[in-house]
Amino acid sequence: MNTLIMALLVSGSFGLNTEKKEAGTLMYVPPFREGKVQTDNTLDANQAVYSFHFETLYQNKETLKSIWLKVDNCEKVKTDLDSLGNCSYTMVPGKHNFKFYADKCQVVKGEVNVNPYTRNNFDITFTDTTIVVVVCKPVIYLHPVEETPVNIKIEPKGELGFTYPTYKDGGWNVLAFPNGRIQEEGTMFNYLFWDGEMPAYKLKYDQSEGEIVSKNELTSFFIRNLGTLGFTSWEMQDFMTYWIPKMMENEYCYVHFLVNDAYEQIASVTVTPKPDHMLRVYMLWHPVKDKKAVNCTPQVFDIDYHEGFGYVEWGGSEIPIENENKKNQKPEK
Amino acid sequence: MKLFILALGLLTTKADYLKESGSHGTYEITGTKPEPTVGKKEAFIEFTFQCPEGTCAKKKIQFTKNGGKPNFVKISDKGTFVHKVTAGEIEFEFMALDCYTITTSKIKIAGQTRVSMTVTFEKNEPMILEEKPVIYLYPTEPTYVNVELSNANDLTFTYPHYTEDGWNILANSDGTLKTDGKEFNYLFWEGKIHQSQLNVDLTSGFIVKSDTVTRFLESSLAKAGLNTKESADFITYWAPRLSQNEFNFVHFNFTEQYDAIAKLNVSPLPDTYLRLYMLWAPLPEGKMNGLVKQEITGVARKGFTVVEWGGSELPAIKGL
C-alpha cells in the first residue's frame, strides 16, 4: 500500500488519503480525494453537507473562480467558488457520482457514499491541459559490437522540436562504430539529438519514489545513480554538465527517473537492428523547499545487462510545479 | 571603433539570472528646515542626486510618488532639483538609466518644510552566465596535461572536478581524456562574469534567422576550424535556444578576445589554440543599422591542439 503524499501540491488540503496503487500504473496525485467527515446533529435525517475544495496542478496563478458540477444524472450546474477555492452543498446522503469540470482542465470524477447527519470534505485537483513541459535534450548513443548500419525512428508523445543531425522521414540512418562514433551522411557525431515539448498532464509517475538532492550533492548523486544504471563516464559527463548548472540554481531538487518502460510516456523508439541492451533514462525534477518537502524513498533500479549491441538514451524535464522557492524562472517560450 | 553595450544602455533585461539580487543604491534625509513660503499642506523637497558617472547632469532620472505617474528630474546649475509635494507620507521610487531602482520606505513630510534628500544611484551591471565552455585536448601522443583557468574564483560548476591545481589529465591523441580512472571527451566549466568584461562588439557580427540557425552555425564553426563532433556539441547546446527567437545577433570572440573572458594556462604548451566564444542576443526588431559582417578566419591545427568553445546569451538588443 502506498501513501500518496500531496503535501507539496495541495496546500489547503483537508487531509491525506491512502489509496492502493494499481499494478503498473504510476500515480501522481489522485484528482478526487475524500477528506474529513464530521457528525452534525443539527442536520435533518435526509441531509448531509458536501464541501469541496478545488485547485489546479501545475503553474496556474489564476485561482479557480467557478466550476461546473454534475451530480448523478442531473444537469451540469455552474458554481462560483470563494476566494480559497471552496464551495458547499447540502444534499441528500447516500451514494452519489460526481463529475467536476473546469476551464481548460481534465474532467475529474468521484464516487461517494455519505451518511446522514455528516459534514464531508472533498479535495479536487484539476489538471490544466494547456501547460506544457519542455522535453530537454534527449540524446542517443549507440554501442555496436561491430560497424553497423542502424535505423532509428522516434515517436515522441508530444511535439518534436530541434533535431541534430536533422531527423528525416523514415528516421535517422547512420553507421555506428564500436567506439561510439556515429556517421551520418559522411559526418561524424558522438550522439543523436532531439528535443520537443509535451502536455504536462501526460506525465505520470509515483512521487513517493525519488530523492531530494541538495545542490552540493548533485554530482555524487548522479555518479551513483547513473553509474548503477550503466552509463559510461562520458555519457554521465554529458548528462551532468547539461543538468547540474540548471539544477544548482536551487538549494534542493526532487529527482525521479523514468527508466525504460516508463520512458515510453515521453517517446517510443524503434531501432533496427534491435539492440541487445536498451537503456533509456528520463529525469523529471523540480525545485523543492527543503529535504523533507516530498516524502519519498530512493528508487531502486533493476537493470539486467545484456552483452552485445547497446543503446543508451537520456533526457529530462523540469516539471512546472508551482514553487515559491523557485529562484530561477525560465524565460517564456 | 567599439561600441560597448553598457555605454549605450540599449538593452532590456530579459532573464532573471541577469539581475543581481539585493537592494542597491541609497537615499538619506540630510535636513529639514521650515519653509513659510508654501501652503500649510505643502512642502519642498530638495534632491541631490549622485550617479556612478560622478555627474548626473546628462542622466535621465525619473521618480514616482506613492506609485503614481513618473516625474522627470531637471537638475539646476547648483546640482539640485527642487520639487513641491503635498505634505503626508510619501514613498518614492527613483529610476536612472543603467542603475538600480531605489524604493524608499514611507517618508513623513510635514507641511511648510523644506526637506533635503540625497539619492545615490548604483550601477546595475548584470552578471552574465558563461555557459558551457568545454575544452578539448588533442596532443600528438598520450600526454599528461595540466590546465588552469585564470578565472578560477568565478567558477560555478566544473566536471571533471577542477582542483586547486587545475585539471590534471592524461590526454590521448584521439581527444579522450582520463582522470580519476574515468574517461571523458572534454573538460567542462561554467562561471559568471560582469557584462562589461565581455567587451561586446556590436559593430560586427551576424543577424541569424531562426530557421537558418543550424546551417549558419555549421558553416561558421567549420570555417573557424571546429571538427564535426565539436560542432555537434556546440550546435545541440545552442541551436535549440537561438531558434526560439525569430532573429538573433551573433558575434564570435576568438582566441585573443577570449582571453579577456578567461585565460587558459596549459602545460605542456600547446602548438595550436582554437578558442571560440559566441556572444548572442535576441534581436526582436530583426535589424541592426551599420552592422558589418564578421570575418571568420580559420585556424590550422598543428601539433598539440587545444580547442575550447563557450558562449553567453546577452539581454535582447533593441533600437539599433
Image (cartoon, rainbow, N blue to C red):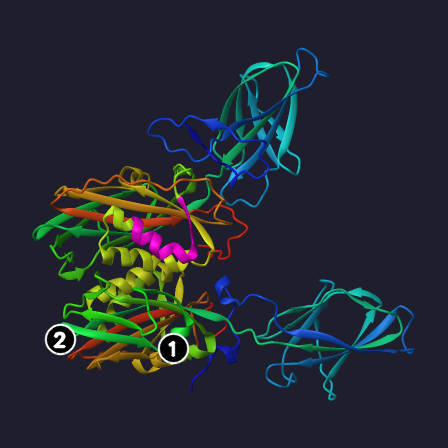
- Residue A93 x %, y %: 61, 14
The label number, if any, that marks residue B140 in the structure image: 2
Q: Quadrant of residue B128?
A: bottom left
| Amino acid type at mark 2 | Thr
Q: Is residue A323 visible?
A: yes
Q: Residues within 10 Å of mark 1 (few under 14, many from 20)?
A: some
Foreground: A280 or A272? A280
Q: Which residues are magenta?
A: A211-225
Q: Regarding mark 1 in the picture, which secondary structure is present there?
A: helix
- Residue A146 x %, y %: 7, 52
* Residue depicted at 50% across the width and 49% down the height: A290
* Chain label for disc 1: B
Q: Is residue A237 above or below residue A202?
A: below
* Chain label for disc 2: B
Foreground: B53 or A243? A243
Q: Is residue A156 above or below residue B210?
A: above
Does residue A313 belong to the magenta stretch?
no
| Amino acid type at mark 1 | Ile
Q: Which residue is mark 1?
A: B261
- As measured in the structure, the alpha-carbon distance from the residue carrying label 2 to the one carrying label 1 is 28 Å
